[in-house]
Image (spheres, helix red, strand yellow):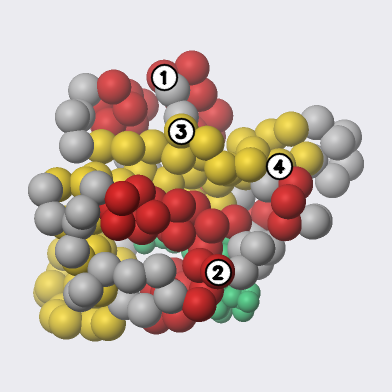
Amino acid sequence: MASDSVVIEPATAMVLDEVLAIEQACFSAPWTRKMLAAELSGNQFAQFLIAKCPDPRSGALVIAGYFCFWIVFEEVRLMNLAVLPAFRRQGIGRRLVCTALQAGVARGASRAMLEVRASNQEALALYHRLGFRQIAVRSRYYVNPDEDAVLMEMTPLRLGPLCEQP
Ligand SMILES: CC(C)(COP(=O)(O)OP(=O)(O)OC[C@H]1O[C@@H](n2cnc3c(N)ncnc32)[C@H](O)[C@@H]1OP(=O)(O)O)[C@@H](O)C(=O)NCCC(=O)NCCS
């Protein structure tokens, strides 16, 4: 897939069903419809991005991934990132996070933070390559299954070389 065929744009409540389907396909303990709806329209700090790209079989534009993040004063907090399995490893996750970091820089944020399951090698690799560093482990932070969280930080907030790729 050509990188310019991916469009990253803000989400609206209209895409709640599609985002819920992605959430359920990607997580063992997915956010519920109510939680997603609250983030989409009831949280003043939350921002939601979707990645649209052509379905390789039909050519129709589909939502392949989404990203929810908060900008809370000086901090960008990465909340939920998911890309459908069929669209992974094509730079969509990277582009979603870079777009959020860019929004944080534009708003004057100075750091970014996230938590990730300790076994999530894909996400850990992505965040490391973007410039995040592990700062702590939160014991048994997650449920279903119970698992530690790795707390990662990027201070100062910056757009590294990975965000310069097309
Ligand atoms: C984590 C996730 C969002 C990554 O999305 P993606 O679109 O496949 O990621 P990208 O293609 O942008 O990957 C960018 C870089 O991250 C790293 N990466 C991503 N997936 C990887 C994998 N399976 N193995 C190793 N490194 C990986 C690589 O460095 C990759 O660059 P490269 O392809 O040039 O080597 C996706 O795997 C996913 O949705 N997983 C399930 C939900 C989840 O775990 N979300 C994160 C919660 S914190």
For the residue pair 7 and 57, the one nearer the viewer reads as 7
For numbered disc 3, what is the local secondary structure? strand
Mark 4 vs mark 3: give the one in front. 3
| Secondary-structure class at tag 1 | helix
The count of marks equals 4
Quadrant hosting residue 60: top right
Measured in 3D between alpha carbons, the distance from the residue under mark 4 to the one under mark 2, in whole angstroms, is 20 Å
Q: Is residue 49 visible?
A: yes
Q: Nearer the viewer, residue 75 or 33?
A: 75
Q: CA distance from mark 1 to mark 4?
A: 19 Å
Which residue bears the numbered disc 1? Answer: 13
Q: Amino acid at mark 4?
A: Cys
Q: Residue at x 72, y 57 (%)?
A: 3
Taking 12 as reference, is 88 left or right?
Answer: right
| Measured Cα–Cα span from mark 2 to mark 3 | 20 Å
Where does label 2 land, which residue?
164
Residue under circle 4? 53
Say whether marks 2 and 3 touch (CB < 8 Å): no
Q: Secondary structure at mark 4?
A: strand
